[in-house]
Image (spheres, helix red, strand yellow):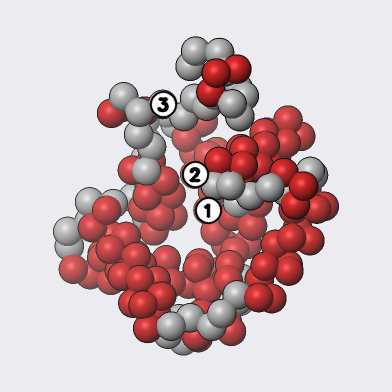
Amino acid sequence: MKSLGARFTEEEARSFLEIWRYSGLLMGIPETILFRDMEEALKIFEVGYCCEPDPDEDSIAMANSLVNSAPLVAGITDPKDRRDLSTYVYSVSRALIGNELADALMYPSQSTFGVLPWFRLQGHYNRLVGKLFPGFVQNNNYTNFTGLMDVSEFDEEGISYRLPDHVHAERSTPW
């Protein structure tokens, strides 16, 4: 997320790690091998990444399907706008995951030079315009891309992100 321009306070970063640690406990990972801090988490990620198998036909199909469905999820119906957003999502994704993995996933070949700095600059610009001119929303690939995140929020549907405060249900307070 930081590569895309997100900023976290120290407390938010710690909370993010705690959620992933808790998720690991729920999935049955023994506490003795769970990370305790960011440094350990990054080391475990590196080891896991080294052991990850090459993408197979299913992962290639899934990755490309996700990218190409992004415009539909964002509610874009015009064919040219859909192609433009898919191209943009491929570009940002390639910049995030690197050319080697993107090639293995059969992403279209394209340069990633300046993609992430440009994305972050668009984010700063949109936030500034939003502060100066509330209600003015510019429709562009950046807003369409980040709008995908809004679609993934479930609070409006009555689903909460609240979590138990203890790993054992009987010792958790009502949530």
For the point 50% across and 68% down, which residue is it?
Answer: 93
Sequence order check, earlier mark of 3 and 2: 2
| Location of residue 79 in the rendering, given as x and y in whole percent from the top left corner | 18, 68
Q: CA distance from mark 3 to mark 2?
A: 28 Å
Question: Viewer-nearest of labels 3 and 2?
Answer: 3
Identity of the amino acid at label 3?
Ser
Numbered disc in front, either 3 or 1: 3
Vertical relation: 138 (above or below) 68: above
Q: Residues within 10 Å of mark 3 (few under 14, many from 20)?
A: few
Q: Considering the numbered disc 1 on the image, is that residue within a helix, a strand or a loop?
A: helix
Tag 3 and tag 2, C-beta contact below 8 Å: no
Vertical arrangement, residue 173 with respect to residue 57, above or below? above
Residue 11 falls left or right of residue 72 = right
Query: If you read the primary sequence from the N terminus, does the residue marked by circle 3 or circle 1 appear first?
Result: 1
Q: Nearer the viewer, residue 3 or 162?
A: 162
Inspect the image, locate mark 1, and give the three-letter code of the amino acid beneath it.
Gln
Quick check: 1 left or right of 9?
left
Which disc, if any, is residue 122? Answer: 1
Question: Which residue is label 3 attached to?
Answer: 160
Foreground: 35 or 42? 35
* Residue positioned 48% across, 16% down in the render: 175
Where in the figure is residue 81, as x and y percent of width and height? 26, 64
Name the residue beneath numbered marker 2: 126
- Residue 111 makes an appearance in the image: no
Secondary structure category for the residue under label 2: helix
The 10 Å Cα crowd at callout 2, few under 14, some 14 to 19, many 20 or more, is some
Q: Whole-percent x and y of residue 10?
A: 76, 34
Question: Which mark identifies residue 164?
Answer: none
Which residue ends up furthest to the top in the rendered image? 174
